[in-house]
Amino acid sequence: MTSSPLRGAVAKPLERTAELQQLSAVLAAAASGAGRVCVIEGPSGIGKSRLLDECARSAQTLGMSVLRARCSELTRDYPYGVARNLFEAILVRADVPTRANLMRGPAALAEPVFGNGEAADEFGVLHGLYWLTVNLAEQGPTAILVDDLPWADDFSLRFLAHIAERLDDLRRLFVHPVNKRVALQERSALPNVMAAIKKVLGAIPGLEVVELGVPVLSTQASHLSVLPEFKAKLREREFAAAALAGVTTFASIFHACHRELITYQPDVSFELINFMELIGESMGIHIPDLYKRLRLIGDIDAMIADSADLIAAHGLDLDTVRDVLAQDMAGAG
Ligand SMILES: Nc1ncnc2c1ncn2[C@@H]1O[C@H](COP(=O)(O)OP(=O)(O)OP(=O)(O)O)[C@@H](O)[C@H]1O
Ligand SMILES: [Mg+2]
């Protein structure tokens, strides 16, 4: 699957002036010939993809070609999946002479990635991709943006397990007891991540992780949207088991799941939060879940009235705000 460089973000992201300045400097340097590498790190939902949207926009404004790929569980087990996503759109759209120009010289060694011929050896393919990048950059400055890098390979995922191994350093920060019985909205695709999260939560004083013993599926609930009935049944079973176990808290792992889950808050007796909130609580960090509060208002006009000061402060266009909210509400559940 090939993603468009821009994912349709509307307004400027809030409170990201410093990050945007840094990214602009990196892009300006790269556009003037001094190549740069920049890594955006941050917890789930903090706005990494959003920054990449801005990056794509700025790069296009600077006249750079933008290659963009998003890693997922599909690319993870798929050799060169990310490289294919990055380059395919340009190669498919290129006319014959342009394509030949891009694949000229040692870049031809990368042809097997795009379905042409057998790969001689792994190094050859890597070398070919390198030269493809060089050939492309010779045509003009190029920005290569890769989102959700941890999905790209197993090595990055081991990083979370590594954090769990360094729990003794982390434990010192868990100073506030969190007296909660917590069930997790488990997801099967990343067993190492689940184990690491349980280990970290288990180190929080007062917190008890409760096993529900219900079927565990997928990564993000949104991936099951094509099977709405099945998905609803799965969620009902999770909620029923959580109620039976008398949990105080049902915690999602992924923010995409969280955004769906919180819409069911009125239906359940336990709080619906993301697991990061528990870690924050134990560290004495509490950031109100603005998305949850606004989403649960449920009525677009009331949401707009509630956030009138923010909308004014950021000069947002009301019709756009209304459209975005309507889209978001339609996408949930
Ligand atoms: N600075 C910001 N101002 C306003 N909205 C933002 C900002 N950053 C992110 N958002 C919004 O918050 C939501 C989550 O952001 P985004 O998807 O970029 O997070 P992420 O870090 O890429 O998450 P994940 O780790 O799950 O991929 C999106 O709806 C995005 O538009
Ligand atoms: Mg993202």
Image: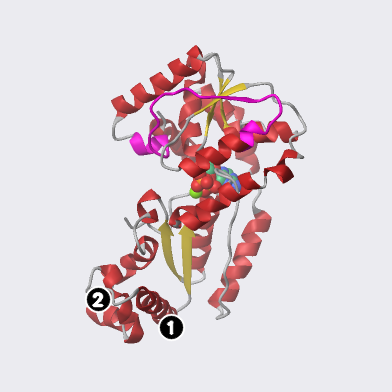
Question: Can residue 158 be seen here?
Answer: yes
Q: Position of residue 202 (x, y in %)?
A: 63, 32
Q: Going 56% across and 75% down the picture, which residue do you hit?
A: 30
Tell which of 50 and 315 is nearer to you. 50
Question: Can residue 13 be seen here?
Answer: no
Q: Position of residue 35 (x, y in %)?
A: 56, 76
Which portion, as a residue range, is magenta? Answer: 200-224
Q: Going 57% across and 69% down the picture, which residue do you hit?
A: 37
- Identified by mark 2, the residue type is Asp
Secondary-structure class at tag 1? helix
Disc 1 versus disc 2: distance between alpha carbons? 17 Å
Task: Using the image, determine if residue 101 lies above or below residue 300.
Answer: below
Compare marks 1 and 2 and give the one earlier in the sequence. 2
What's the magenta bit mostly, secondary-structure-wise? loop
Q: Going 57% across and 48% down the picture, which residue do you hit?
A: 160
Q: Residues within 10 Å of mark 1 (few under 14, many from 20)?
A: few
| Magenta segment includes 32 | no
Q: Position of residue 260 (x, y in %)?
A: 45, 30
Query: Is ligand 2 less than 8 Å from the beta carbon at label 1?
Result: no
Task: Using the image, determine if residue 98 lies above or below residue 172.
Answer: below
Tell which of 72 and 242 is nearer to you. 242
Q: Quadrant of ligand 1?
A: top right
Give the residue at mark 1: 138
Which corner quadrant of the image does residue 326 belong to? Answer: top left
Left or right, residue 62 beside residue 175: left
Q: State the scheme by which the image is colored.
A: secondary structure
The mark found on residue 293 in the picture is none
Q: Going 65% across and 25% down the picture, which residue do you hit?
A: 207
Q: Position of residue 87 (x, y in %)?
A: 36, 68
Give the residue at mark 2: 95
Task: Using the image, determine if residue 84 lies above or below residue 301.
Answer: below
